[in-house]
Image (tube, grey):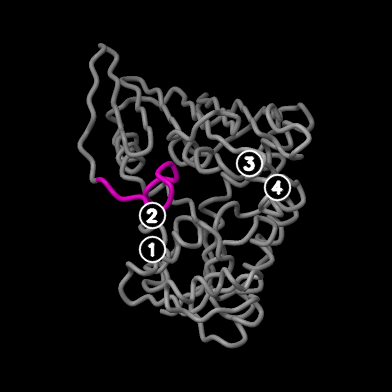
Amino acid sequence: MRAAIVGCGSIAHVHAAAIGELPGITLAAAADIRPERAEEFQQRYGCAAYSSLTEMLAREELDVLHICTPHYLHVPMLCYGLEHGVHVFSEKPPVISREQLRELQSLKSGKRFGFCFQNRYNPSIRAAKELLASGLAGKVLGARGIVTWSRDAAYYTDSGWRGRLETEGGGALINQSIHTLDLLVYLLGKPLAVEATMQNHHLKGSIEVEDTMEAFIRFADGKHALFYASTAYCDNVPPLIEVSCEHLTIRIEDQALTYLYRDGHSEQPELPQAKALGKNYWGSGHKRCIEDFYQAIAENRSFPQDLPGTLDTICLMLGSYESARTRNEIDLLDTYGL
């Protein structure tokens, strides 16, 4: 299969590296409105370089388009790719508004599209998911997810699009910690309601989005999760996820998995270790996630991170912002029809 990437920033290099390790997949082209970025891809990966998605799709025979552009362009470019007969694999976030969600829900295409929630493929997450499914941990009581990273003013001002609601859609939640929010849904199931608050603590006057978001999330069967994310910390550390169960607590920090038993002892199961293609705190699942998308196409099966597979996360994200803006708890079932 012939692949192409639109948007040649740092995350695009992770996609290019993953594509380069997959047999039978060729990175044929890359496009960016900054020609020097596309030309860098041409020199580094041996692909054709273009200055626009329109030109690239007009000139290249492609099977899959990878979208690695600013947030507000994900849905328009996804739709454009499908209209031009290619499968689409998009970086997060899937949408930045309810309007974009409705647009995706109305799509009718013979081509597939999916999203890069790569941390579902981390060995630690897979092992935790299997343990919960086995019933050995007992009833799930609740969970917490904590993300504390560091982003300074230059991170936003130098980008040309980050830090603005219109183009980024939000801050610490939609950009840095949506993966942790997704993992809470992946491990606990369907979210029912959310009550959230957001603040801008350390970049007042520099950005119009939040640097900190906290939420109380209600799940089925009386479960709830506490969520906290901030980019006002001094360092970038692996996110922490804990799932409290009847017989033990599951603690996940990137590739480290610990079982904390009620009698006080703990154990760390031996897991396969995978190399992160990008920053260590991004997780190690990019290659397996991208590989699964291509296999889903080849095997004509559904991809777990398609729109139905990520809808709960999308609605929880949108609901968290709505709750923080209105200062009300948002019933996700009534609001989004989950």
Q: Are marks 1 and 3 in contact (CB under 8 Å)?
A: no
Above or below, 188 relative to 69:
above
Q: Are marks 2 and 1 in contact (CB under 8 Å)?
A: yes
Taking depth in this image into account, of 45 and 171 the one nearest to the observer is: 45
What's the residue at 31%, 44% (across, down)?
Answer: 123
Distance from disc 2 to disc 3, alpha carbons, whole Å, reads: 26 Å
What's the residue at 57%, 45% (across, down)?
Answer: 312
Distance from disc 1 to disc 4, alpha carbons, whole Å, reads: 29 Å
- At mark 2, the secondary structure is loop
Between discs 2 and 4, the one toward the N terminus? 4
What's the residue at 66%, 41% (across, down)?
Answer: 171
The residue under label 1 is 18
The residue under label 4 is 157
Above or below, 24 relative to 188:
below
The residue under label 2 is 277
The residue under label 3 is 317
Q: Which amino acid is tagged 1? A: Ala
Q: Which amino acid is tagged 2? A: Leu
Above or below, 29 relative to 37:
below
Q: Which amino acid is tagged 4? A: Thr
Between discs 1 and 3, the one toward the N terminus? 1
Taking depth in this image into account, of 51 and 117 the one nearest to the observer is: 51
Distance from disc 2 to disc 1, alpha carbons, whole Å, reads: 8 Å
**Mark 4 nearby-residue class (10 Å; few <14, some 14–19, many ≥20):** some
Between discs 2 and 3, the one toward the N terminus? 2
- At mark 3, the secondary structure is helix
Specify the segment rendered in magenta: 273-285
Asked if one can make out residue 338 in the rendered structure from this viewpoint, the answer is no
